Amino acid sequence: MLRVGSKAACMACRNLVSTNMGVRFRVPLQKLHPLSRAIHHRYSGNNNPQRPPHRTAARYFTSMSRLPMRPPKPPPGSGGRNYQQQRNFWVARLAARLLKLRYILLGSAVGGGYTAKKTYEEWKDMLPDFSEYNWVIPDFVWELSEQIDFDKLAKALPEMEEIAKLLPDLDKIGENFTFLKSLLSSETTGDPPLKATDSSTASPQDGSDKQYKKTSDKEKLDQLQEELLRTQLKYQRMLERLEKENKELRKVVLQKDDKGIHQRKVKKSLIDLYSEVLDILSDYDANYNTQDHLPRVVVVGDQSAGKTSVLEMIAQARIFPRGSGEMMTRSPVKVTLSEGPHHVAMFKDSGREFDLTKEEDLAALRHEIELRMRKSVKEGQTVSCETISLSVKGPGIQRMVLVDLPGVISTVTAGMASDTKETIFSISKAYMQNPNAIILCIQDGSVDAERSIVTDLVSQMDPQGKRTIFVLTKVDLAEKNLASPNRIQQIVEGKLFPMKALGYFAVVTGKGSSGESIDSIKDYEEDFFQNSRLLRDGMLKAHQVTTKNLSLAVSDCFWKMVRESVEQQADVFKASRFNLETEWKNNYPRLRELDRNELYEKAKNEILDEVISLSQVTPQHWESILQKKLWERVSTHVIENIYLPAAQTMDSGTFNTTVDIKLKQWTDKQLPHKALEVAWETLQEEFARFMAEYKGKDQDDIFDKLKEAVKDESIKRHKWNERAMDSLRVIQHNALEDRSITDKPQWDAAIQFMEETLHSRLKDTDSVIRDMVGPDWKQRWLNWKNRTPEQHIRNETKNELERLLKLHDDHTAYLANDEVTTVRKNLEGRGVEVDPVLIKDTWHQLYRRHFLQNALSHCNLCKRGFYYYQRHFVDSELECNDVVLFWRIQRMLVITANTLRQQLTNTEVRRLEKNVKEVLEDFGEDMERKTHLITGRRVQLAEDLKKVREIQEKLEAFIEALHKEK
């Protein structure tokens, strides 16, 4: 750089300044001093020496103008006036530049303010609209904040002097720690803390001093321990008081929830979302190796070890049934604990809330749990694997999910199933083998540790103890009964049992009385540990005692396990869903994914449509099938017991008398019952026919078992209205008493009915005779068939009896004994030995055929007998009483069919429809029955898809809420 005041520097500055001020000095750049050229090139920003000098000079002046300048001296040889003018001009330029700087600053301030405002508006526009989320913070929170007297709250807090009193004396603690350090170092090195003199030269006074020092050290150590314990208790009381005040304040806030928050959309709590996932998984039959590995706290222990009492202390209510030495927990009970404004309990499948602050509700809850347990246990069993789901809410309750399992037993006693021990072991292992389950191992401290069974079971399922928390109960009895309290210390330090655990706790769950309240048990537990030498002598640490500390530790461990494993489980269910959806697309590409409940609703609608179709059956169809089926049912009785006995009397008066008597007896005893049976069977057959026709339209056979079961159950429940039988009996009796045929068509219809009936009976009789005598000569020749010896005897008997009928065409229906003897001797003369019973049996069929043939011939004659019947010609040789009988029977059938049809359409079809609806409702509520009736891989696949999707969606909602809580 140029030295200030040098000749070259002054000349360079004068040339540059003069150039910028209008004084044109034409000085070539090459004639400048080399240092001046260097300055010029440097400040001109260009190393090109050919650049015009006035531009470089202006740039240099601009750079130089930023530096403080002093007025230049007048050049030598110039006058004072020129110098003054030049000086005034420079001052004006400087003032103008200063004024320009002011405007620049003012403009910069205005522009900066505008830019800041614009940036603020942009940021404000970028923020989302939070007005939609005003419902998240209820109005009562703002009202409550206005109602709270913060000055009063501040006064309630402890003063600094009070807190300072609770703080320990730091100087004394420092001295105590120095003393402890010296003790520990002496124990480590083996040297005593105080060096003793040589024993050979020590005097008795030295020995006494040494004993005194040892005693003082021990007293100082005890004093230090007591002081630490007192300090810890002070802190504990202070924390308890603050927690109690916080609990009351939270309760006030949560109770405001009842004044309007229910009218808004309330989000479910985190633990409720998680509990719903576990409830779905408990009902899900996992396929594709998809297992439930979501965390929950599994409470296991020996029978009567106090695990239920520990769970009640955590839930802060006596909610479980109790018994002295008796097995009370007969099935797993899942308890979801969460915080709420009121202390209430509720079952998963019930809307009733049990107020846990009222003793009557507590008793009702215990009774309901006991009933559900006994109901879940199948006949012949003692315990059940069916889970009972219960939720408990209340102020200050730690959020977690616990499962109380039946107590492990060593011996099966009287009244228990033989496999009870193995069943309890299998249930416990099923819950504990979940790698993310937290095992709360409960051990009774009042009995010998060697009698414990559950510790071996837990150590098998969790050998490293990474998810086990050990709890020693009844510590008050243990301290009282054990001669060596060090045994308790060994237990809680994990040195007595071969099992390992994350933590060890010692608790007291009461004095053993079932009437104790939770508050009294808490007070007794706190008083015991405050006065117990186990805590005073350092055998137990303060964080290892009381159920409160246990609850906090279990809750922390539970949520830690949840956060570590829930996303992995969500991925597992996502993969399972993909596999199931792929299988459905490959096997059922054109079918909807209907689960069992949806399929049941579809089948229910189809069955109801089929029942409704019964009301659309025409009256003609009902009467036709009823008349036909009724005649098929009663025809044998009419022919065999009424017509044939009466027709064989050969007397008109006797015929009518016999017919009237037998018809009256038949109507009073059998006919109405037979008619109702026929009507009920017809209704069943029509119902089955409609269901079969509907099945033909729909080829899906999933509903076959369900429809058949609904039909059978509906028919089983349906009871015909018995009051209709009396009226039906009167109608039938009146119909059969009428003998007046009013017109020729009715006469002809009766004759046709009689001919059809007689032809049918004659055909049946010929068939019986052919079976008796065997094939004739034509069949034997063409079909190569032979008669059996019995058929040969019957054929010979038939030929002999036919000759008898030809001789006596008007023979009676029965053979006389002498006629039987004659026939038998004639057959013996031809070498055929025959039994008299066989002769009478053969005669019965032959005479029946002979009678029916004659009756048909007489029926043909009666076709022209309506004239004689209408004129009442008694002396006429043509008697057609049998035609009148068949007309009476036919008319009775028509009237009965019409009566039954009316009863069917007006009453029974509607009652059947009602029964079907009731059966469908009952089946719909019975999940086990639906599972049995609607089966198949398609149904199971749809069920699995629905469950997996629901689990995945709820897991994702839970994970999202979990991340927001973080």
Image: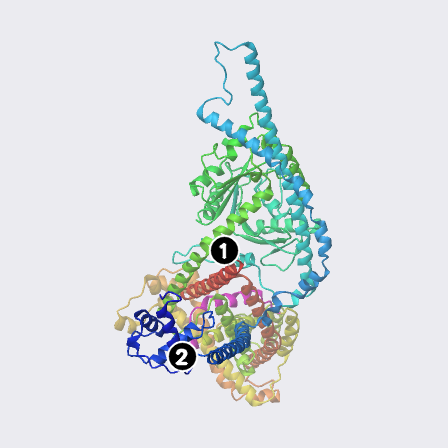
- Categorize mark 2 by other alpha carbons within 10 Å: few (<14), some (14-19), many (20+): some
Magenta span: predominant SS is: helix
Would residue 182 appear left or right of 33 to someone viewing this image? Answer: right
**Residue 555 percent coordinates (x, y):** 54, 49
Q: Quadrant of the N terminus?
A: bottom left
678 lies above or below 234 = below
In front of the other: label 2 or label 1?
2
Which quarter of the figure has residue 801? bottom left
**Residue 372 percent coordinates (x, y):** 59, 52
742 or 410: which is nearer to us? 410
Residue 870 belongs to magenta span: no
**Residue 868 percent coordinates (x, y):** 58, 88
- Categorize mark 1 by other alpha carbons within 10 Å: few (<14), some (14-19), many (20+): some
27 or 278: which is nearer to us? 27
377 or 763: which is nearer to us? 377
**How far is mark 2 from mark 1, CA to CA?**
99 Å
Badge 2 amino acid: Ser
Q: Which residue is mark 2?
A: 18
**Residue 412 percent coordinates (x, y):** 51, 38
Badge 1 amino acid: Ser
Residue at 54 percent of width and 85 percent of height: 878
For mark 1, give the secondary structure. helix
Q: Which residue is mark 1?
A: 282
Does the CB distance between marks 2 and 1 fall below 8 Å?
A: no
- The magenta stretch is 696-720
For mark 2, give the secondary structure. helix
Mark toward the start of the polypeptide (2 vs 1): 2
Mark number, residue 236: none
Residue 709 belongs to magenta span: yes
